């Protein structure tokens, strides 16, 4: 306890006191490994370059961490005052002691060499920043996705379902791509992850064409593979380690609704509706909704949605607890993103660890529920009720 408290104290106190250049800019938590370009007896740096490095340090966006800050402090002191000659501080003054140790460890390094190393270190930090392009807040879409647009900007990874002409219906390929995007988002430097849809729909649920692409193993294989994929897909949401936010930009159907119980916040436009037409389709609930919906909204309302296909408005969904807040469609995107950007400036680790505490107790249960729901669906997908409902959808379409 005491050690942890003093480490925390050290971290806090070092930041403002490294006036030799540590930035006061808001820092992200992680920092790439620093490569020191120690050029030894290489060219000497001028006072001007030294001053410039000091200024560059102030502009760093990413916190270099205490170890590097101590190194910078020591090199700065050595470069400006020469070898450490002040008395060793008391063991109990952790901050002073750490700084003294760092400076003292440089021994008799000359002022010129210290200046050189200081400048080299600052340059390596500047070049390790998430790329000067990344400072531009419009980041490019990540490569490798055909059905999604995935971007990371301002500490937010946004996964946008991107089949607007099909109302963002989720094909098999899209399930796989979402799994991949969620896996990457879990590991990247972002603080929060957002799922949203492109176009007028958030998502129209499972693409019913998934039922018509029968593999060579027949319909049983299709159902089996589908259940395995679905279980894996939902598992990624159960285990997602960071705050996960749904920005529901329009109507939502099927699995895009049931999954919302696994999100930490759900913001919706007042144009959104929430529809889970499972019985109509001869199917059964998934996305852990058979457990989460009764827990969130109470059994009677969950039954109305999951058994009787009641389509609810955004305001109803908010009153029932499925949606966190509803915004007027006109100002939806603007209001929501202002808020999300502010959330994404909160300390990354604190948010992630708090989320894990809140969700952790339920994880085992959720995986069990997920497994049972997928088993049930595997049977349902082979049922006449389901097959007839899917045929009806395509018949209706062909008559239009
Ligand atoms: N599966 C397959 N195709 C879908 C789809 C889905 N879940 N949702 C939308 N589409 C397709 C439509 O077939 C249409 O394709 P087309 O342009 O080739 O004809 C296109 O997306 C646009 O949809 P459309 O039906 O013309 O738009 P709409 O505004 O009239 O209706 C929906 C939108 C979502 C209400 C309607 O498409 C629908 O009921 N889809 C099925 C929803 C569903 O049952 N999902 C599964 C839940 S478990």
Image: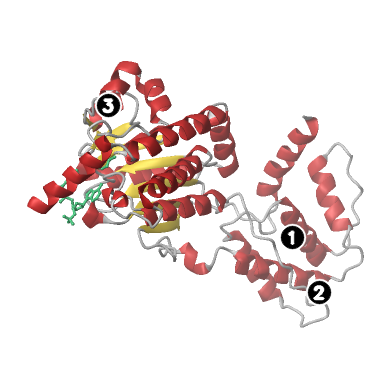
Question: Which is more toward the observer, 123 or 178?
Answer: 178
Q: Earlier in the sequence, mark 1 or mark 2?
A: 1
Asked if the residue at tag 3 contacts the one at tag 1, i.e. Cβ–Cβ closer than 8 Å, the answer is: no
Residue bearing mark 1: 72
Q: Residues within 10 Å of mark 3 (few under 14, many from 20)?
A: many
Residue bearing mark 2: 112
Q: Residues within 10 Å of mark 1 (few under 14, many from 20)?
A: many
Residue bearing mark 3: 305
- Any part of residue 341 in sight: no
Q: Secondary structure at mark 2?
A: helix
Question: Which is more toward the observer, 392 or 67?
Answer: 392
Question: Which is more toward the observer, 342 or 306?
Answer: 306
Q: Earlier in the sequence, mark 1 or mark 3?
A: 1
The location of residue 221, given as percent across then percent down, is 41, 49
The answer to whether residue 326 is left or right of residue 127 is left
Return the residue found at the far left.
Answer: 400
The location of residue 96, given as percent across then percent down, is 81, 45
Q: Residue at x 40, y 39 (%)?
A: 378
């Amino acid at each position: 306890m005491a050690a942890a408290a003093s480490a925390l104290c050290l971290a806090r106190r070092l930041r403002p006191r490294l006036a030799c250049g540590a930035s006061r800019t808001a820092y992200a938590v992680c920092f790439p490994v620093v490569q020191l370009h120690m050029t030894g007896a290489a060219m000497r740096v001028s006072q001007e370059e030294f001053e410039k490095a000091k200024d560059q340090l102030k502009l760093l966006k990413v916190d270099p961490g205490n170890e590097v800050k101590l190194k910078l402090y020591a090199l700065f002191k050595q470069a400006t005052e020469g070898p450490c000659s002040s008395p060793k501080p008391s063991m109990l003054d952790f901050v002073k002691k750490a700084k003294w140790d760092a400076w003292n460890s440089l021994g008799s390094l000359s002022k010129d060499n210290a200046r050189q190393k200081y400048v080299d270190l600052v340059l390596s930090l500047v070049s390790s920043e998430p790329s000067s392009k990344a400072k531009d807040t419009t980041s490019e879409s990540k490569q490798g996705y055909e059905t999604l647009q995935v971007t990371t900007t301002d500490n937010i990874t946004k996964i946008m379902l991107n089949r607007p002409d099909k109302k963002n219906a989720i094909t098999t390929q899209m399930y796989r791509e979402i799994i991949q995007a969620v896996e990457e988002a879990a590991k990247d430097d972002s603080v929060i992850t957002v799922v949203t849809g492109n176009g007028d729909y958030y998502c129209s649920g499972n693409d019913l064409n998934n039922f018509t692409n029968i593999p060579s193993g027949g319909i049983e294989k299709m159902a089996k593979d589908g259940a395995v994929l679905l279980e894996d897909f939902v598992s990624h949401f159960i285990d997602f380690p960071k705050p996960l936010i749904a920005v529901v930009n329009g109507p939502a159907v099927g699995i895009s609704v049931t999954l919302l119980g696994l999100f930490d916040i759900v913001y919706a436009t007042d144009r959104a509706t929430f529809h889970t037409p499972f019985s109509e389709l001869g199917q059964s609930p998934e996305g852990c909704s058979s457990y989460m919906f009764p827990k969130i909204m109470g059994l009677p309302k969950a039954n109305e949605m999951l058994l009787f296909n009641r389509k609810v408005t955004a305001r109803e969904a908010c009153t029932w607890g499925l949606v966190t807040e509803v915004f007027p469609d006109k100002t939806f995107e603007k209001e929501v993103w202002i808020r999300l950007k502010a959330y994404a400036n909160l300390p990354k680790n604190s948010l992630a660890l708090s989320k894990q505490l809140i969700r952790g107790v339920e994880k085992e249960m959720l995986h069990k529920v997920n497994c049972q729901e997928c088993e049930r669906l595997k049977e349902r997908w082979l049922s006449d009720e389901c097959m007839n409902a899917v045929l009806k959808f395509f018949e209706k379409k062909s008559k239009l």
